[in-house]
Amino acid sequence: MTQPTIKVNDDELEYEVARRRTFAIISHPDAGKTTLTEKLLLYAGAVELAGSVRARKNQHHATADWMEMEQQRGISITTAALQFDCRGYRINLLDTPGHQDFSEDTYRTLMVTDSAVMVLDSAKGIEPQTRKLFQVCRLRRTPILTFINKLDRPGREPLALLDEIEQELGIGSVPMNWPIGNGPSFKGVYDLAKQQVLLFERTHHGQHRAPVQVHDLYDPQLAILVGQDEYQQLVDEIELLAAAGSSFSEEAFLTGNITPVFFGSAINNFGLEPFLQTLLDLAPAPGPRMSSDGLIEPTSPGFTGQIFKIQANMDPQHRDRVAFLRVCSGRFEKDMQLYHSRLKRKVRITRAYRFFAREREIVEEAYPGDVVGLANPGLFNIGDTLCDGKVIRFEDIPRFTPEHFCLLHNRHIAKYKQFNKGIEQLEEEGATQVLYFTDSLRKEPVLAAVGELQFDVVVARLNSEYGVDVSTERLPFTCARWVECNLEKLSDIIWPSRSKLARDREGRLVALFSSDWEVNFCLEKNPGLILKELG
Ligand code: G4P
């Protein structure tokens, strides 16, 4: 096992930045994100037996009382970052919820990660949620490593999977290892850089690290160990890859132009050790972030951080709200007084927490790349900058294009004040986007969300926190586009008959469509019209 070579520097801040690795895992549900997380913890030495994350996750599901809704559905809405140490590195694994609890938060988290691991199921390749999450990573050209999982089951040909990544996602794919066998005959991987064959053994339920044997490709024993046909296929494919000459370039990876690809089986711990080591070696330490004052280096001494997520009711007994801050530069300390760039005043940070599932602990100090939860008595919005020393403001975190829409009816008109206050605050928190149709006299809000579950969250929270009784009516739209054109030209625009126009809270025009086809139709009919996906 190689030890990391973190540059040890007298400067504590530089040292702490250099050893941080902050990444998120992106995948379509069921590709193996939870299993991979668990196995990374096992190989990192953070847990002794694989299964503890899932056990905690299941336990959390069973006993969650975040909201009654959460209990009824057995889902987790509470998200955070998982922090653990591994071989001298400090890892922040950012949670990117999938399944029904998929929401704009999942996208926002990708705005503050330094790299991402994309998990694919070898039998399914690129699936819809992977594609969406990948595209969000692309906005910041986030470096992405790919782990193709479930090689122990019959899957697609490795070359076809590499080709699919290139064709569907438009990113170069460079294999770092090559699978030996496929499905039941999957025995291990060939490490292309080290030119070593790694054969793994299964362990009971994959709870322990898989024992590994290392061989040379031309070791005469190998054909006996893996089977003559599998061996011949491996040799042929390695020769083919060598002839194709696609080699890994760190620079191309760091600029998001290529993704290094690993084959393995998370459940059986096959290929996990080399994957973790390469992840630690390749994933970048926190980098500079763009602000109103240019790029802010993580090692610049003044503290800066940005709020990227707000979570309400983390503790239902206290009805608290927690704002999650990513530390961008300098050192965070408990009880700091920080300048709030949007409110233009100082705020004292008295309660700062780190979360793991439902547990929380006080944070005494944190460094760039770390995530800190701040008790938020309505002070913070998504995108807010906190700083110490020079006043700066980070670039806004974009609003992502919603795909689900509904009208929100207030059942008790007498409570219109609470209703309006509730939706305004929930929108500020980023729970949903709120639009108003331009042609409607009754100004009923349209909720627009990335994931459907957000509607239920909004309804439940309006009821429990603001005491208003509301109902939703689904609308048939599936995409929204922010419209850019001269006002005088607006009346000349030909819209598809089923589309509708609305305004967001800032008064910007948003067109709602029922399909991508309608968006394309609109663009074709109206040369010069700009329809933007992000607000
Ligand atoms: P997710 O978080 O991306 O949704 O996926 P998760 O890890 O929960 O994995 C989804 C299913 O795929 C699980 O099976 C898991 O055991 C299985 N799986 C993960 N990695 C591998 C692998 O390398 N090979 C194979 N064959 N299966 C894998 P499940 O039946 O849904 O759950 P469980 O009963 O195993 O807990």
Image (cartoon, rainbow, N blue to C red):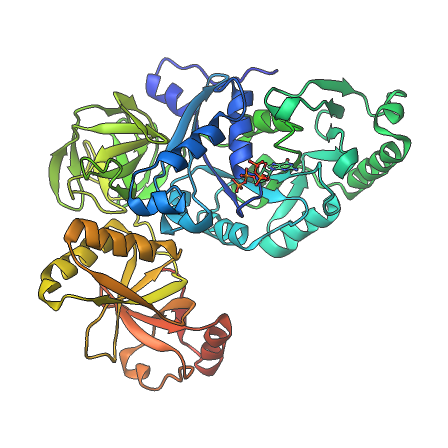
Residue 128 percent coordinates (x, y): 54, 55
Residue 83 percent coordinates (x, y): 40, 26
Residue drawn at x 19%, y 28% is 351
Q: In which quadrant of the rendered view does residue 449 lie?
A: bottom left
Location of residue 17 with respect to 168 vertically, above or below: above
Work out whether residue 207 can be spotted: yes
Q: In which quadrant of the rendered view does residue 252 lie?
A: top right
Q: Return the residue nearer the eye: 67 or 301.
A: 67
Location of residue 132 with respect to 369 vertically, above or below: below
Work out whether residue 535 can be spotted: no
Residue 142 percent coordinates (x, y): 48, 43
Q: Quadrant of the C terminus?
A: bottom left
Location of residue 30 with respect to 526 vertically, above or below: above
Q: Return the residue nearer the eye: 510 or 321.
A: 321
Q: Return the residue nearer the eye: 186 or 340.
A: 186
Q: Quadrant of the N terminus?
A: top right
Residue drawn at x 51%, y 74% is 517
